[in-house]
Image (cartoon, helix red, strand yellow):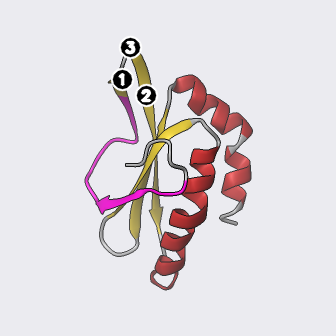
């Protein structure tokens, strides 16, 4: 996990979990926005590099998220968790930044 450092993330072993989770943190609710990606074998290296060097740092730089986790299951299956400060931060990200950052994947 990286908090407040938009230039890095954590690649951890995959573990099962639900798509949206709520965490209690100092009288506020943190929301985990989770994405699952299935990557073609020939694109795995490029995907991991892109997530590590561009997408995750860009997403954290929006200020809406406190941390990000990238986990890997079997070859080609990834789970990305973005820890939003609260529900309002997630909603603002989805309304103002998500389309721009998702366009990089196209």
Say what secondary structure mark 2 lies in: strand
Describe the element under mark 3 as helix, strand or loop: loop
Q: Quadrant of residue 21?
A: top left
Taking the spot 38% from the left edge, 14% from the top edge, the residue there is 27
The Cα atoms of the two marked residues, 2 and 1, are separated by 7 Å
Label 3 vs label 1: CA separation? 6 Å
Sooner in the amino-acid sequence: mark 2 or mark 1: 1
Q: Determine which residue is flagged by label 2.
A: 30
Distance of label 3 from label 2 (alpha carbons): 10 Å
> Tags 3 and 1 in contact by the CB under 8 Å rule?
yes
Identified at 59% across, 35% down, the residue is 64
Could one spot residue 82 in this view of the protein? no
Q: Is residue 106 above or below residue 63?
A: below
Relative depth, front residue between 14 and 68: 68
Q: Nearer the viewer, mark 2 or mark 1?
A: 1
Q: Secondary structure at mark 1?
A: strand
Query: Circles 3 and 2: CB distance less than 8 Å?
Result: no
Residue with the mark numbered 1: 25
**Is 47 on the left-hand or right-hand side of 97?**
left
Q: Is residue 78 above or below residue 67?
A: below
Nearest the viewer among 18 and 32 is 32
Which residue is drawn at the image coordinates 45% and 31% (left, top)?
31
Q: Is residue 72 magenta?
A: no
Residue 85 in sight in this render: yes
Q: Could you tell me if the residues under marks 2 and 1 are in contact, i.e. CB atoms within 8 Å?
A: yes
Dot label at residue 27: 3
Q: Nearer the viewer, residue 32 or 4?
A: 4
Relative placement, left or right, of 78 versus 43 is left
- x, y percentage for residue 84? 50, 34
Label 2 packing within 10 angstroms: few (<14), some (14-19), many (20+): many
The magenta region covers 7-22
């Amino acid at each position: 996990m990286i908090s407040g450092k938009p230039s890095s993330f954590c690649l951890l072993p995959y573990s099962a979990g639900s798509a949206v989770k709520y965490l209690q943190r100092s009288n506020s609710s943190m929301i985990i926005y989770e994405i699952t990606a299935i990557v073609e074998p020939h694109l795995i290296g490029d995907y991991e590099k892109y997530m590590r060097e561009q997408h995750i740092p860009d997403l954290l730089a929006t200020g809406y998220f406190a941390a990000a986790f990238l986990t890997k299951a079997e070859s080609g299956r990834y789970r990305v968790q973005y820890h939003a400060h609260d529900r309002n931060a997630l909603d603002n990200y989805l309304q103002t930044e998500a389309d721009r950052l998702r366009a990089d994947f196209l």
